[in-house]
Amino acid sequence: MSYSSNDHTYALCAYKESAFLEECVKSLIAQTLSSNILIATSTPNEHITSIAQKYDLPIYINEGEKGIGGDWNFAYSKANTPLITIAHQDDIYEPTYTEEMLDYINKSKNPIIYFSGYGELRNGEKIYNNSLLKIKKLMLSPLKIRAFWTSRFVRRRILSLGCPICCPAVTFVQKMVGENPFTNDYLSDIDWQQWEMQSRKKGSFVYNSKPLMCHRIHEESATTEIIGDSKRSKEDFDMFCKFWPRPIAKFIAKLYSNSEKSNNV
């Protein structure tokens, strides 16, 4: 099957009154190939509504299950297209994200997810080569070889060492991923949990190593807050236990925790 830009939706999750929401919207509108954009929120307010109206975007209010998993599932469910990217309000996308995503997916065999490389936004500056990003690029390097896209063994070995896949850089193929892919079991590793589940399926993890989006690191971001509160440690250990015996999982989790500290502002 060949997908077009009409088959893709950016489901943008908005929360409270982010100063960066409009910048994210502008990056989606500026794509070289235009696709669908919607805004989903569980915290409706004038700020979000005004931006939706300014750019003539549909806005959906989540009145059901809350939490990160509930909010992501709600946004995902409102995208009535085969391909879905869950955009986060603080992040930005490079202009060719949609174009390159479609090109890669259309050239792949039975795609489950597509994901690009990514950079970080710190104090307005794009960063691509700090120590954490270098490690994650190294972890994903086997997937630069297209023959490995369909290898469950390779993708599970990568995920057994941590989570190098940035959630907002991912496009889901709905027919493969299914409905309500996320759970509220975790706070910080909800995406890693999802990749682990999808890694068991027959199909392709389609990887484009170009950094086609930037994830903003700042004091109010959910990731920074979670790491600051040390809520991640138990979840990391649980995830490593899906791949390793408990003593090894405990050792790797400690090393992983130290590497993730670079996410602190």
Image (cartoon, rainbow, N blue to C red):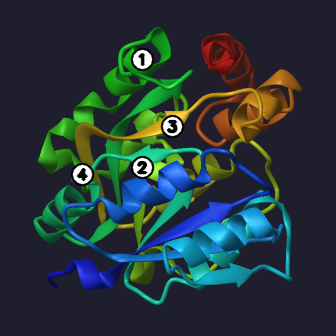
Q: Is disc 3 in contact with disc 2, using a CB cutoff of under 8 Å?
A: yes
Q: Amino acid at mark 1?
A: Ile
**Residue in the image at 24% along x and 51% along y:** 149
Residue that mark 4 sits on: 149
Which residue lies most toward the bottom here? 80
Q: Amino acid at mark 2?
A: Ala
Residue 227 pos. (x, y %): 78, 26
Q: CA distance from mark 2 to mark 4?
A: 17 Å
Residue that mark 2 sits on: 169
Residue that mark 3 sits on: 215
Mark 1 / mark 2, whichever is N-terminal: 1
Q: CA distance from mark 1 to mark 3?
A: 16 Å
Q: Amino acid at mark 4?
A: Trp
Which numbered disc, 1 or 2, marks the residue closer to the eye? 2
106 sits to left or right of 242:
left
Seen in the picture, residue 226 relative to 130 is either above or below; the reply is below
Mark 4 / mark 1, whichever is N-terminal: 1
Asked whether residue 163 appears in the rendered view, the answer is no
Q: CA distance from mark 1 to mark 2?
A: 17 Å
188 sits to left or right of 199:
right
**Residue in the image at 24% along x and 33% along y:** 142
Secondary structure type for disc 4: loop
Residue that mark 1 sits on: 135
Mark 1 / mark 3, whichever is N-terminal: 1
